[in-house]
Amino acid sequence: MIFNSISFGIFLFIVFTIYWFILKNNLKLQNLFVLVSSYVFYGWWDSRFLILIVFSSLIDYFVGLGLEKNNSNKIRKLLLFTSVFINIGLLGIFKYFNFFIDNFVEATQFFGFHINLSTIHIILPVGISFYTFQTLSYSIDVYRRTLKPTRDIIAFFAFVSFFPQLVAGPIERASNLLPQFYKKRKFVYASAVDGLRQILWGLFKKVVIADNCARYVNDIFSNYTDYSGTTLILGGVFFAFQIYGDFSGYSDIAIGTARLFGFNLMQNFAFPYFSRDIAEFWRRWHISLSTWFRDYLYIPLGGSRVGPGIKIRNMFIIFLVSGFWHGANWTFIVWGFLNAIYFLPLMLTKSNRNNTDIVAHGKLFPTFKEFFQIGVTFFLTVFAWIFFRAENIWIALAYIKHLVLNIHIATSQPFIFLFDKITIFLLLLIIVEWLQRDKQHALDIASMETYKKWVIYTIIALIILNFGITNETPFIYFQF
C-alpha cells in the first residue's frame, strides 16, 4: 500500500472515520487502533515481516524497562549492547549479508584464493532501516537518562510502527513522538486542513515531478552511450529533482497525514536545493537522518570538540556510514565519500556554519553571490547523485567519462527534453518553493484569502489529475 494509490486513499478514509467519529473519547482505544491500522498498512506488502517489527519493538521495550530498574553500569551497558546488536544485526542480515559475502569472495580471489560461498535470496523488509533507527534512538536515550522509559506497551508499539512515517520516515525521536500518544488528542480543523495542503503538495512532487522525471532518467541512464554529454547532464539534473520530489514528497504526505490524526512530526526537508554550500544542504536534506547520525554517532565519537585530525575522521565516518545506510552497494559509499570531500574545505576553514539563515530572507531575488553559491552547490550535488543512481561504480564512471568526452550539443536531444511539459512543472516547483522557503512546507498558505487558496488547490489538483503518472510507482526510499 503506497501513498499514491487508491487503496491508501480508501484505507486513510476508513481509519480517519473510525479514529475520530467512533474512538475520539477513548485515548487507549485510539492508540490501539493506530497500532492495528499500522500493522495492516505494513502487512499489506508482506505480512511475514510483521514479526520483525514486533520483535524489534519488544526488545527495545523491555530494554527500556531494564535500563530504568538497574543502576549498575555493567548491566546497563549490556542491555544497550543487546538493543544495538539485535537491531543492527537484523539490519545487517536482511540488507547487507549478500554484500559482505560477495565482497569477501572477491577479496580472496584477488589474493589468489578461491572460496565458494553462496549468497541467499533475501527480501529486504520495507522500512527496516527507518524503524530500527527509531527504536535504537529510544534505547540510547533511555540509557543516557535523557528519556524516561514507557510502561505503556501499546503506546510504544504504536510509536515504532506509526503508519504515516513507518516505511520512509521521518525517523522520529521518542522524545517528540512518544509523548503524543499519552495525551488526549482533539481534532483541530486548521491543523487538519494544513495537513491536507501538505499532502496535496507531496502528491504533486511525487506523481508529477518525480515520476515524470523518472521516465527520462531511466532512459538516459540505461542508454547513456546513445546520448550527448549535454543530455547526460540533464539526466543528472532530472534525477536530482526525481529523488527530491520522490523522497520529500513522501515526507510531506507522511507529515500531513499525521496531522490529520493530531500528531506533529518533525520537518524532514527544508528546501535543500536553495543551499549555498554542502553543509547547509545537509542541514536541509533528510534532516531526521542527518541529525540522528549527528546525535548518536558523530557527537559520541568526539564531534567537533577534538583535534583537527580526529574531527576529519569523524566527519568521514558520518558521511560513509550515511552512504552505506542507503544500500548495500559501493555506489552509495562513493556518494557519501564525495559529500565528505565537499564538506572538508568548509570544515578546515571553519565556515561550515556560515549559512544557517534562510537565503535572501525577506527579498524576492538572491544576490549574484548567493545565486552563484546555490548553482555550485547544486552542481556538486548532481555530480554525486550520478553515483547514487548508477547500478554500480563502473557504470557511474562510464557515464561520467561519456559525459566529459561528449560535452557538446550534437543533436536536438537536450532541447527535446527541455521543451517537454516537465520543464514547466520543474519551474513551477522551483518558483513556489522559493517563494515559500521560509515556511514549513510549500503550501503553508493559511493566511491567504480563501478564494486564492482554492484557485491554487484547483490548479495543483488539475495538474495531478492530467499530468501525474497514474500507475502506482513505489517511492525510491522504500528500497532503503
Image (cartoon, rainbow, N blue to C red):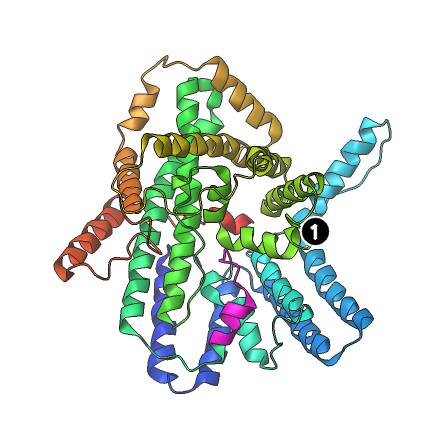
Q: Position of residue 140 (x, y in %)?
A: 66, 65
Q: Give whichever of 369, 12 is nearer the camera.
A: 369
Mark 1, secondary structure of its residue: loop
Depicted 360 relative to depicted 438: above or below? above
Q: Position of residue 441 (x, y in %)?
A: 34, 54
In which quadrant of the rendered view does residue 109 lie?
Answer: top right
Q: Residues within 10 Å of mark 1 (few under 14, many from 20)?
A: some
Depicted 62 relative to depicted 247: above or below? below
What residue is pinned by disc 1?
Answer: 301
Residue 177 colored magenta? yes
In which quadrant of the rendered view does residue 258 lie?
Answer: bottom left
Q: Residue at x 73, y 38 (%)?
A: 102
Depicted 277 relative to depicted 260: above or below? above
Q: Amino acid at mark 1?
A: Leu
Q: Residue at x 73, y 66 (%)?
A: 80
Q: Would residue 341 appear left or right of 360 to someone viewing this image? A: right
Residue 413 colored magenta? no
Q: Quadrant of the N terminus?
A: bottom left
Q: Residue at x 49, y 80 (%)?
A: 182
In which quadrant of the rendered view does residue 174 lie?
Answer: bottom right
Q: Position of residue 228 (x, y in %)?
A: 42, 17
> Which residues lie in the magenta part?
167-180
Residue 328 in view in this figure? no
Residue 458 in view in this figure? yes
